[in-house]
Image (cartoon, helix red, strand yellow):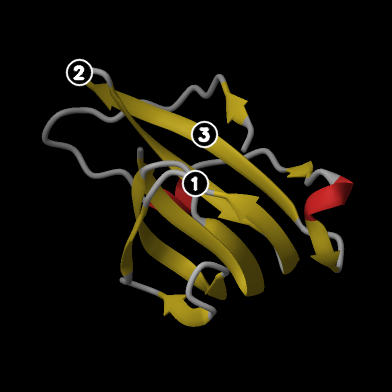
Amino acid sequence: MTDTDADVALTAGQPLAASAVVVTHEALDAASVVEGLPTAGYTVLDTLGDTEIGIWEMSVGTATDTEEDEVFVVVSGRASIHFAADDRTIVVGLGDVVRLTAGMQTTWTVTETMCSVRVP
């Protein structure tokens, strides 16, 4: 995940279109890439106490990851996420909310560039 210093901030009482937030992508570590040339990026929107809120994106492709504790809401795109521990796969898209826990071994297959609001 890439942290960027964005000129983005949430303003109390004002909406912010997630689709309008610029997220700078970088190539994923070659060791994690399974298929394609996926890129990913993260932009911090704000903090609530010690909790950071941001926008995460991943482009089309397949890559493995070791998760952190987080909740995310998909705001655009589509992906499947395979969980190695119990050999199951979920498909996520617009409006889906997912809870991940630290240490989960996952494989992400993004079929439409995915954008999500992330709260670790």
In the image, is 49 to the left or to the right of 73?
left
Amino acid under label 3? Thr
Circle 3 sits in a helix, a strand or a loop, which is it? strand
What secondary structure is found at the residue carrying circle 2?
loop
- Residue 109 location (% of width, % of height): 66, 73
Q: Residue at x 62, y 38 (%)?
A: 1
Q: Amino acid at mark 2?
A: Gly
* Camera-nearest label, 3 or 1: 1
The kind of residue tagged 1 is Gly
Closest to the observer: 67 or 77?
Answer: 67
Residue pointed to by mark 2: 49
Mark 3, other Cα within 10 Å: few <14 / some 14–19 / many ≥20: many
Image quarter of residue 3:
top right
Q: Position of residue 83 (x, y in %)?
A: 52, 69
The mark lying in front, picked from 1 and 2, is: 1
Q: Which residue is mark 3?
A: 43
Q: In the image, is residue 83 above or below residue 91?
A: above
**Picture quadrant of residue 72:** bottom left
- N-terminal of the pair, mark 3 or mark 1, is 3
Mark 3–mark 2 contact, CB under 8 Å? no
Q: Nearer the viewer, residue 66 or 46?
A: 66
Residue 6's place in the image compared with 24, above or below, is above
Give the image location of residue 27, x and y in percent.
81, 45
Circle 2: is it few (<14), some (14-19), or many (20+) Cα within 10 Å?
few
In the rendered image, which residue does mark 1 sit on? Answer: 103
Position above or below: 30 against 96 = above
**Marks 1 and 2, how far apart in space?**
24 Å
> N-terminal of the two: label 3 or label 2?
3
